[in-house]
Amino acid sequence: MKNRNCHFRHNEHHPRIGFGLFLIALGLALLVATNDLLHLGGVSEYFNWKTAMIFIGVLLFLNLEFVGGVFLIAGGVWFMRDEIFPFASEQFKSFFWPSIIALGGVAFILTALFKKRCIR
């Protein structure tokens, strides 16, 4: 009988993959900022605490940490809603967080499916 280490996660990324995903996401963010693809203004308008929340959320999502990723992206979008969705109505505001909480539940399920722990 083989002695298995039950503390590692089945689909865990190698650290270089996580760093590579970080560089890809950073490169895409810089591409969007330098070309003003979201029409926010200068590069300094793209890099603030709200966009940092979204950026870190995307990185977590890419590293299969769905719950944290969903909530960080949702928080960043909520604080940037006036810039992203200038037409946001009260109906949008009343449906946003309940929808995010439901997506958080889906994220918990996806995380459980993608990251099964060894049980022994």
Image: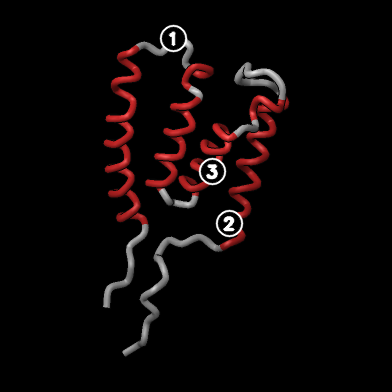
- Could you tell which of marks 2 and 1 lies nearer the N-terminus? 2
| In-front residue for pair 14/107 | 107
Q: Position of residue 58 (x, y in %)?
A: 51, 41
Displayed quadrant of residue 99:
top left
Label 3: which residue? Answer: 56
The tag earlier along the polypeptide, 3 or 1, is: 3
Q: Is residue 119 above or below residue 41?
A: below
Q: Which mark is residue 36?
A: none
Name the secondary structure under disc 3: helix
Report the side of 24 relative to 105 (left or right): right
Instruction: State the SS at label 1.
Output: loop
Q: Residue 13, how many percent across, how many down?
A: 51, 60
Q: Earlier in the sequence, mark 3 or mark 2?
A: 2
In the image, 37 versus 82, the foreground residue is 82
The residue under the point 39% across, 73% down is: 7
Q: CA gap, disc 2 to disc 1?
A: 39 Å
| Disc 2: which residue | 17
**Distance CA(mark 3)–CA(mark 2):** 16 Å
Q: Residues within 10 Å of mark 3 (few under 14, many from 20)?
A: some
**x and y, in percent, of residue 91 in the image:** 30, 14
Residue where numbered disc 1 is placed: 87
Please give the name of the residue rendered at 44% of the width and 9% of the height, measured from the top-left corner: 87
